Image: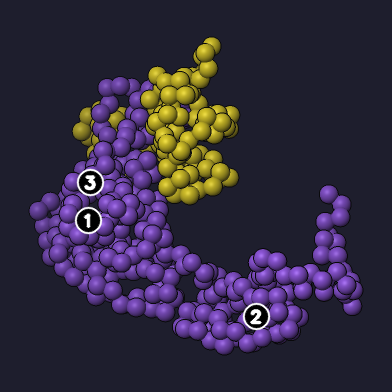
Amino acid sequence: MRDPYEILGLKRDADEAAIKAAYRKLAKRHHPDLHPGDKKAAERFSELNNANDLLSDPEKRARFDRGEIDAEGHEVPPRGPFYRDFQQGPEYERYGTAHGGESAGFTEDDIAAFLARHFNARGEGANMRMPGGDLRYALTLGFLEAATGTSRRVMLPDGRALDVKIPAGIEDGHIIRLKGQGRPGIGGGPPGAALIEVTVAPHPFFRRVGDDVIVDLPVTLQEAVLGASVSAPTIKGRVKLTIPPGSGDGTRLRLRGRGIRQGHQYVELKVAVPPGDEPALADFLRGWTPAHPFNPRAGMEEP
Amino acid sequence: MMQLTAVVALFDDLGEPELIGWVERGWVRPEEAAAGPLFHDVDVARVRLIHDLRTVMRIDDETIPVVLSLLDQVYELRAGLRAVLRAVEAQPEPVRKAILTAIG
Protein backbone atom coordinates (compact mmCIF):
# COMPACT_ATOMS: atom_id res chain seq x y z
CA MET A 1 0.00 0.00 0.00
CA ARG A 2 1.18 3.52 -0.81
CA ASP A 3 1.82 6.07 1.88
CA PRO A 4 -1.55 7.20 3.28
CA TYR A 5 -0.48 10.86 3.34
CA GLU A 6 0.42 10.62 -0.34
CA ILE A 7 -2.86 8.94 -1.22
CA LEU A 8 -4.85 11.74 0.37
CA GLY A 9 -2.41 14.43 -0.79
CA LEU A 10 -1.72 15.60 2.76
CA LYS A 11 1.23 17.12 4.52
CA ARG A 12 2.48 15.13 7.53
CA ASP A 13 1.08 17.75 9.91
CA ALA A 14 -2.38 17.94 8.33
CA ASP A 15 -5.17 18.43 10.85
CA GLU A 16 -8.36 16.44 11.21
CA ALA A 17 -10.40 18.83 9.06
CA ALA A 18 -7.92 18.49 6.20
CA ILE A 19 -8.00 14.68 6.40
CA LYS A 20 -11.79 14.68 6.35
CA ALA A 21 -12.01 17.12 3.46
CA ALA A 22 -9.48 15.19 1.39
CA TYR A 23 -11.15 11.85 2.02
CA ARG A 24 -14.60 13.19 1.20
CA LYS A 25 -13.46 14.84 -2.01
CA LEU A 26 -11.61 11.77 -3.27
CA ALA A 27 -14.34 9.33 -2.25
CA LYS A 28 -16.77 11.36 -4.33
CA ARG A 29 -14.49 11.04 -7.31
CA HIS A 30 -13.59 7.39 -6.96
CA HIS A 31 -16.61 5.59 -5.50
CA PRO A 32 -16.90 2.38 -7.58
CA ASP A 33 -20.66 2.69 -7.96
CA LEU A 34 -20.15 6.00 -9.72
CA HIS A 35 -17.74 4.30 -12.15
CA PRO A 36 -19.51 1.13 -13.19
CA GLY A 37 -17.13 0.48 -16.10
CA ASP A 38 -13.83 1.15 -14.36
CA LYS A 39 -12.34 -1.93 -12.75
CA LYS A 40 -9.61 0.06 -11.00
CA ALA A 41 -12.12 2.22 -9.11
CA ALA A 42 -12.70 -0.44 -6.44
CA GLU A 43 -8.96 -0.64 -5.83
CA ARG A 44 -8.59 3.14 -5.57
CA PHE A 45 -11.59 3.41 -3.28
CA SER A 46 -10.26 0.74 -0.95
CA GLU A 47 -6.87 2.50 -0.92
CA LEU A 48 -8.66 5.70 0.12
CA ASN A 49 -10.58 3.91 2.85
CA ASN A 50 -7.39 2.38 4.21
CA ALA A 51 -5.62 5.73 4.24
CA ASN A 52 -8.56 7.45 5.90
CA ASP A 53 -9.00 4.67 8.45
CA LEU A 54 -5.37 4.96 9.48
CA LEU A 55 -5.07 8.74 9.56
CA SER A 56 -8.45 9.60 11.08
CA ASP A 57 -7.73 7.52 14.17
CA PRO A 58 -5.29 9.65 16.23
CA GLU A 59 -3.79 6.62 17.97
CA LYS A 60 -3.20 4.64 14.79
CA ARG A 61 -1.88 7.75 13.09
CA ALA A 62 0.61 8.42 15.89
CA ARG A 63 1.83 4.84 15.78
CA PHE A 64 2.18 5.04 12.01
CA ASP A 65 4.09 8.34 12.29
CA ARG A 66 6.48 6.77 14.79
CA GLY A 67 7.01 3.87 12.41
CA GLU A 68 5.53 1.30 14.78
CA ILE A 69 3.01 0.13 12.23
CA ASP A 70 3.07 0.33 8.48
CA ALA A 71 0.24 1.00 6.09
CA GLU A 72 0.11 -2.69 5.19
CA GLY A 73 -0.74 -3.84 8.68
CA HIS A 74 -3.81 -1.69 8.88
CA GLU A 75 -5.81 -2.41 5.84
CA VAL A 76 -9.51 -2.55 6.46
CA PRO A 77 -11.25 -5.57 4.98
CA PRO A 78 -12.28 -4.92 1.39
CA ARG A 79 -15.80 -3.64 1.10
CA GLY A 80 -18.49 -4.95 -1.07
CA PRO A 81 -20.17 -6.24 -2.98
CA PHE A 82 -20.77 -2.85 -4.50
CA TYR A 83 -24.04 -1.88 -6.08
CA ARG A 84 -22.42 -1.93 -9.50
CA ASP A 85 -21.59 -5.61 -9.08
CA PHE A 86 -25.26 -6.34 -9.69
CA GLN A 87 -25.62 -4.38 -12.89
CA GLN A 88 -25.65 -7.48 -15.04
CA GLY A 89 -27.80 -9.64 -12.82
CA PRO A 90 -31.53 -10.17 -13.11
CA GLU A 91 -32.01 -8.60 -9.66
CA TYR A 92 -30.96 -5.21 -10.93
CA GLU A 93 -34.14 -4.99 -13.01
CA ARG A 94 -36.01 -3.66 -10.03
CA TYR A 95 -34.20 -0.35 -10.33
CA GLY A 96 -34.38 0.08 -14.09
CA THR A 97 -37.19 2.04 -15.67
CA ALA A 98 -37.85 -0.54 -18.34
CA HIS A 99 -37.65 -4.18 -17.47
CA GLY A 100 -35.78 -5.27 -20.55
CA GLY A 101 -33.15 -7.32 -18.83
CA GLU A 102 -30.08 -9.03 -19.95
CA SER A 103 -29.68 -12.61 -21.04
CA ALA A 104 -27.36 -14.53 -18.77
CA GLY A 105 -25.10 -15.78 -21.55
CA PHE A 106 -23.46 -12.42 -22.26
CA THR A 107 -20.22 -11.91 -20.46
CA GLU A 108 -18.74 -8.84 -22.17
CA ASP A 109 -18.31 -6.79 -19.03
CA ASP A 110 -16.06 -3.99 -19.99
CA ILE A 111 -17.79 -1.88 -22.58
CA ALA A 112 -14.80 0.38 -22.85
CA ALA A 113 -12.57 -2.58 -23.67
CA PHE A 114 -14.95 -3.65 -26.40
CA LEU A 115 -15.03 -0.22 -27.93
CA ALA A 116 -11.28 0.11 -27.76
CA ARG A 117 -10.87 -3.27 -29.43
CA HIS A 118 -13.14 -2.40 -32.31
CA PHE A 119 -12.64 1.29 -32.80
CA ASN A 120 -9.06 2.07 -31.86
CA ALA A 121 -7.48 -1.03 -33.26
CA ARG A 122 -8.62 -0.40 -36.82
CA GLY A 123 -5.89 0.11 -39.41
CA GLU A 124 -2.51 1.37 -38.27
CA GLY A 125 -1.51 -1.46 -35.95
CA ALA A 126 2.16 -1.34 -35.08
CA ASN A 127 2.88 2.21 -36.26
CA MET A 128 0.31 3.66 -33.96
CA ARG A 129 1.30 6.93 -32.37
CA MET A 130 -0.60 7.69 -29.20
CA PRO A 131 -0.34 10.30 -26.48
CA GLY A 132 0.59 8.97 -23.05
CA GLY A 133 -2.02 8.61 -20.33
CA ASP A 134 -2.64 11.19 -17.62
CA LEU A 135 -1.51 10.61 -14.05
CA ARG A 136 -3.92 11.65 -11.33
CA TYR A 137 -2.77 13.03 -8.06
CA ALA A 138 -4.42 14.46 -4.96
CA LEU A 139 -3.23 17.53 -3.09
CA THR A 140 -4.83 18.88 0.05
CA LEU A 141 -4.16 22.48 1.07
CA GLY A 142 -4.95 24.36 4.22
CA PHE A 143 -7.38 27.27 3.86
CA LEU A 144 -4.62 29.86 4.31
CA GLU A 145 -2.19 28.17 1.90
CA ALA A 146 -4.91 28.17 -0.75
CA ALA A 147 -5.88 31.76 -0.04
CA THR A 148 -2.41 33.25 -0.19
CA GLY A 149 -0.74 30.81 -2.59
CA THR A 150 2.19 28.53 -1.87
CA SER A 151 4.48 26.00 -3.41
CA ARG A 152 4.30 22.30 -2.66
CA ARG A 153 6.41 19.31 -3.52
CA VAL A 154 4.33 16.46 -4.84
CA MET A 155 5.60 12.90 -5.05
CA LEU A 156 4.28 11.21 -8.17
CA PRO A 157 3.45 7.51 -8.05
CA ASP A 158 6.47 6.76 -10.25
CA GLY A 159 8.85 8.25 -7.67
CA ARG A 160 9.50 11.62 -9.29
CA ALA A 161 9.10 14.77 -7.23
CA LEU A 162 7.42 17.79 -8.75
CA ASP A 163 7.44 21.29 -7.34
CA VAL A 164 4.01 22.70 -7.93
CA LYS A 165 3.29 26.39 -7.68
CA ILE A 166 -0.12 27.00 -6.15
CA PRO A 167 -1.55 30.36 -7.23
CA ALA A 168 -3.24 32.51 -4.58
CA GLY A 169 -6.98 31.97 -4.39
CA ILE A 170 -7.06 28.45 -5.79
CA GLU A 171 -10.44 26.88 -5.16
CA ASP A 172 -11.54 23.56 -3.79
CA GLY A 173 -11.93 21.03 -6.62
CA HIS A 174 -9.59 22.85 -8.99
CA ILE A 175 -7.43 20.59 -11.13
CA ILE A 176 -3.88 21.74 -11.85
CA ARG A 177 -2.76 20.39 -15.20
CA LEU A 178 0.96 19.89 -15.64
CA LYS A 179 1.54 19.21 -19.32
CA GLY A 180 4.07 16.58 -20.23
CA GLN A 181 4.38 15.18 -16.70
CA GLY A 182 2.14 12.15 -17.26
CA ARG A 183 2.89 8.75 -18.76
CA PRO A 184 5.23 8.66 -21.74
CA GLY A 185 3.66 8.59 -25.20
CA ILE A 186 3.45 5.49 -27.36
CA GLY A 187 5.25 5.28 -30.70
CA GLY A 188 6.66 8.78 -30.41
CA GLY A 189 3.42 10.32 -29.20
CA PRO A 190 3.51 13.19 -26.71
CA PRO A 191 3.51 12.37 -22.98
CA GLY A 192 0.31 12.78 -20.98
CA ALA A 193 -0.35 15.31 -18.23
CA ALA A 194 -0.17 15.11 -14.47
CA LEU A 195 -3.56 16.14 -13.11
CA ILE A 196 -3.41 17.40 -9.57
CA GLU A 197 -6.79 17.66 -7.92
CA VAL A 198 -6.86 20.19 -5.14
CA THR A 199 -8.87 19.89 -1.95
CA VAL A 200 -9.03 22.94 0.29
CA ALA A 201 -9.59 22.11 3.95
CA PRO A 202 -12.03 24.28 5.89
CA HIS A 203 -10.72 26.81 8.41
CA PRO A 204 -12.01 27.04 11.99
CA PHE A 205 -13.08 30.68 11.57
CA PHE A 206 -12.48 31.95 8.06
CA ARG A 207 -15.08 31.29 5.38
CA ARG A 208 -14.80 32.08 1.71
CA VAL A 209 -17.36 33.51 -0.71
CA GLY A 210 -15.72 34.12 -4.08
CA ASP A 211 -12.63 36.17 -3.28
CA ASP A 212 -14.14 37.64 -0.12
CA VAL A 213 -13.31 36.22 3.27
CA ILE A 214 -15.86 36.27 6.06
CA VAL A 215 -15.09 35.90 9.72
CA ASP A 216 -17.37 36.00 12.77
CA LEU A 217 -15.86 38.18 15.47
CA PRO A 218 -17.18 38.03 19.02
CA VAL A 219 -17.30 41.41 20.82
CA THR A 220 -18.37 42.30 24.33
CA LEU A 221 -21.51 44.27 25.10
CA GLN A 222 -19.44 47.37 25.95
CA GLU A 223 -17.44 47.17 22.73
CA ALA A 224 -20.67 46.91 20.71
CA VAL A 225 -22.51 49.73 22.47
CA LEU A 226 -19.63 52.12 23.15
CA GLY A 227 -17.44 51.35 20.18
CA ALA A 228 -13.87 50.12 20.42
CA SER A 229 -10.69 49.36 18.59
CA VAL A 230 -10.01 45.61 18.55
CA SER A 231 -7.60 43.28 16.86
CA ALA A 232 -9.09 41.03 14.17
CA PRO A 233 -7.52 38.11 12.29
CA THR A 234 -7.17 38.31 8.51
CA ILE A 235 -5.63 35.80 6.14
CA LYS A 236 -2.49 37.95 6.03
CA GLY A 237 -2.16 38.58 9.76
CA ARG A 238 -3.92 40.57 12.46
CA VAL A 239 -5.18 44.12 11.89
CA LYS A 240 -6.74 46.83 14.06
CA LEU A 241 -10.46 47.15 13.51
CA THR A 242 -12.63 50.06 14.66
CA ILE A 243 -16.03 49.04 15.93
CA PRO A 244 -18.41 52.00 15.65
CA PRO A 245 -20.56 52.82 18.70
CA GLY A 246 -24.03 51.29 18.57
CA SER A 247 -23.00 48.18 16.60
CA GLY A 248 -25.32 45.20 16.95
CA ASP A 249 -25.20 41.47 16.57
CA GLY A 250 -24.65 40.70 12.89
CA THR A 251 -23.22 44.12 12.01
CA ARG A 252 -20.91 43.67 9.02
CA LEU A 253 -17.69 45.64 8.74
CA ARG A 254 -15.53 45.64 5.66
CA LEU A 255 -11.76 45.44 5.63
CA ARG A 256 -10.98 46.65 2.15
CA GLY A 257 -8.50 44.59 0.15
CA ARG A 258 -7.88 42.14 2.98
CA GLY A 259 -9.52 39.22 1.19
CA ILE A 260 -8.18 36.81 -1.38
CA ARG A 261 -6.47 38.50 -4.38
CA GLN A 262 -8.49 41.73 -4.85
CA GLY A 263 -11.29 40.61 -2.50
CA HIS A 264 -12.27 42.10 0.83
CA GLN A 265 -12.66 40.68 4.27
CA TYR A 266 -15.99 41.05 6.02
CA VAL A 267 -16.17 40.90 9.79
CA GLU A 268 -19.54 39.93 11.26
CA LEU A 269 -19.93 40.97 14.87
CA LYS A 270 -21.32 38.52 17.40
CA VAL A 271 -22.25 40.33 20.60
CA ALA A 272 -21.39 38.25 23.65
CA VAL A 273 -23.36 38.89 26.83
CA PRO A 274 -21.05 38.52 29.87
CA PRO A 275 -21.16 35.05 31.40
CA GLY A 276 -22.15 34.77 35.06
CA ASP A 277 -24.04 37.18 37.30
CA GLU A 278 -23.70 40.90 36.64
CA PRO A 279 -25.85 42.53 39.38
CA ALA A 280 -24.89 46.10 38.39
CA LEU A 281 -25.87 45.49 34.79
CA ALA A 282 -29.14 43.82 35.82
CA ASP A 283 -29.98 46.75 38.14
CA PHE A 284 -29.25 49.22 35.40
CA LEU A 285 -31.43 47.37 32.87
CA ARG A 286 -34.38 47.18 35.29
CA GLY A 287 -34.36 50.95 35.63
CA TRP A 288 -33.62 51.62 31.97
CA THR A 289 -36.11 53.06 29.48
CA PRO A 290 -34.76 52.84 25.91
CA ALA A 291 -34.72 56.11 24.00
CA HIS A 292 -35.83 54.19 20.86
CA PRO A 293 -38.07 51.31 21.99
CA PHE A 294 -38.34 48.52 19.41
CA ASN A 295 -39.55 44.95 19.10
CA PRO A 296 -36.84 42.74 17.57
CA ARG A 297 -39.45 40.05 16.93
CA ALA A 298 -41.77 42.39 15.00
CA GLY A 299 -41.70 40.20 11.90
CA MET A 300 -42.64 37.06 13.82
CA GLU A 301 -45.88 38.17 15.47
CA GLU A 302 -48.19 36.04 13.32
CA PRO A 303 -47.11 32.39 13.25
CA MET B 1 -32.23 -12.27 1.87
CA MET B 2 -32.36 -10.11 4.96
CA GLN B 3 -34.91 -8.49 7.20
CA LEU B 4 -34.81 -4.76 7.85
CA THR B 5 -33.30 -5.20 11.33
CA ALA B 6 -30.46 -7.31 9.94
CA VAL B 7 -29.66 -4.71 7.29
CA VAL B 8 -29.58 -1.93 9.87
CA ALA B 9 -27.20 -4.03 11.98
CA LEU B 10 -24.61 -3.97 9.17
CA PHE B 11 -23.99 -0.27 9.80
CA ASP B 12 -23.04 1.36 13.06
CA ASP B 13 -24.83 4.61 12.26
CA LEU B 14 -28.04 3.66 10.49
CA GLY B 15 -31.37 3.64 12.32
CA GLU B 16 -34.48 1.64 11.42
CA PRO B 17 -36.68 4.72 10.90
CA GLU B 18 -34.07 6.09 8.51
CA LEU B 19 -34.02 2.95 6.38
CA ILE B 20 -37.83 2.77 6.45
CA GLY B 21 -37.82 6.36 5.16
CA TRP B 22 -35.56 5.37 2.27
CA VAL B 23 -37.91 2.53 1.36
CA GLU B 24 -40.94 4.84 1.58
CA ARG B 25 -39.27 7.33 -0.74
CA GLY B 26 -38.52 4.53 -3.20
CA TRP B 27 -34.74 4.87 -2.95
CA VAL B 28 -34.53 1.18 -2.06
CA ARG B 29 -37.15 -1.28 -3.26
CA PRO B 30 -36.99 -4.46 -1.20
CA GLU B 31 -39.39 -7.32 -1.82
CA GLU B 32 -42.70 -6.87 -0.05
CA ALA B 33 -43.39 -9.89 2.13
CA ALA B 34 -46.01 -10.67 4.74
CA ALA B 35 -43.45 -10.38 7.53
CA GLY B 36 -42.15 -7.02 6.27
CA PRO B 37 -39.65 -5.98 3.59
CA LEU B 38 -37.09 -8.54 2.45
CA PHE B 39 -33.76 -7.16 1.23
CA HIS B 40 -32.00 -9.04 -1.57
CA ASP B 41 -28.24 -8.68 -2.06
CA VAL B 42 -28.77 -5.97 -4.66
CA ASP B 43 -30.93 -4.01 -2.20
CA VAL B 44 -28.31 -4.28 0.54
CA ALA B 45 -25.65 -3.03 -1.90
CA ARG B 46 -27.92 -0.13 -2.79
CA VAL B 47 -28.41 0.68 0.89
CA ARG B 48 -24.62 0.74 1.23
CA LEU B 49 -24.37 3.08 -1.75
CA ILE B 50 -26.98 5.46 -0.32
CA HIS B 51 -25.20 5.32 3.03
CA ASP B 52 -21.91 6.28 1.32
CA LEU B 53 -23.57 9.08 -0.61
CA ARG B 54 -25.00 10.57 2.57
CA THR B 55 -22.25 10.02 5.14
CA VAL B 56 -19.00 9.90 3.17
CA MET B 57 -19.88 12.30 0.36
CA ARG B 58 -22.28 14.46 2.39
CA ILE B 59 -24.92 14.60 -0.32
CA ASP B 60 -28.09 15.95 1.19
CA ASP B 61 -31.45 14.22 1.10
CA GLU B 62 -32.90 16.57 -1.50
CA THR B 63 -30.14 15.67 -3.93
CA ILE B 64 -30.05 11.90 -3.34
CA PRO B 65 -33.00 11.17 -5.67
CA VAL B 66 -31.31 13.18 -8.43
CA VAL B 67 -28.10 11.18 -8.03
CA LEU B 68 -29.94 7.84 -7.90
CA SER B 69 -32.04 8.66 -10.93
CA LEU B 70 -28.99 9.62 -13.01
CA LEU B 71 -27.12 6.56 -11.77
CA ASP B 72 -30.03 4.29 -12.69
CA GLN B 73 -30.06 5.81 -16.15
CA VAL B 74 -26.32 5.23 -16.60
CA TYR B 75 -26.67 1.62 -15.52
CA GLU B 76 -29.61 1.12 -17.80
CA LEU B 77 -27.81 2.71 -20.74
CA ARG B 78 -24.87 0.43 -20.09
CA ALA B 79 -27.17 -2.59 -20.12
CA GLY B 80 -28.64 -1.37 -23.42
CA LEU B 81 -25.21 -0.74 -24.89
CA ARG B 82 -24.05 -4.20 -23.85
CA ALA B 83 -27.06 -5.70 -25.60
CA VAL B 84 -26.22 -3.80 -28.79
CA LEU B 85 -22.56 -4.77 -28.63
CA ARG B 86 -23.51 -8.40 -28.08
CA ALA B 87 -25.75 -8.25 -31.13
CA VAL B 88 -22.92 -6.70 -33.17
CA GLU B 89 -20.48 -9.39 -32.04
CA ALA B 90 -22.90 -12.09 -33.12
CA GLN B 91 -23.02 -10.82 -36.71
CA PRO B 92 -20.88 -12.24 -39.51
CA GLU B 93 -17.66 -10.34 -40.13
CA PRO B 94 -18.82 -8.22 -43.14
CA VAL B 95 -21.92 -7.03 -41.27
CA ARG B 96 -19.84 -6.24 -38.21
CA LYS B 97 -17.40 -4.24 -40.30
CA ALA B 98 -20.23 -2.37 -41.98
CA ILE B 99 -21.80 -1.45 -38.64
CA LEU B 100 -18.52 -0.30 -37.12
CA THR B 101 -17.73 1.77 -40.19
CA ALA B 102 -21.16 3.34 -40.07
CA ILE B 103 -20.71 4.27 -36.40
CA GLY B 104 -17.50 5.96 -36.73
**Residues behind callouts 1 and 2 on a single chain:** yes
For badge 2, the amino acid type reads: Leu
| Residue found at the far top of this picture | B34
Secondary element at image label 3: helix
In the rendered structure, the answer to whether residue A149 lies left or right of residue B31 reads left
User: Residue A72 or A134: which is nearer the viewer?
Assistant: A72
Q: Which mark is residue A74?
A: 3
Determine the residue positioned at 86% across, 65% down: A295
On screen, residue A112 versus residue A92, left or right, reads left
The quadrant the N terminus of chain B occupies is top left
- Amino acid tagged 3: His
Q: Does residue A81 sit above or below A166 in this rendering?
A: above
Quadrant of residue A294 in the image? Answer: bottom right
Image hue for chain B: yellow
Q: Which chain shows up in purple? A: A
Q: Position of residue A162 (x, y in %)?
A: 22, 72
Q: Residue furthest front?
A: A279
Q: Identify the chain of the residue marked 3, using the numbered disc in the image.
A: A
* Label 3 packing within 10 angstroms: few (<14), some (14-19), many (20+): some
Near mark 2 (Cα within 10 A), the count class, few <14, some 14-19 or many ≥20, is some
Residue A253: mark? 2
Where does the image place residue A25, in percent across and percent down from the top left?
40, 56
Name the residue rendered at 41%, 60% in the picture: A17
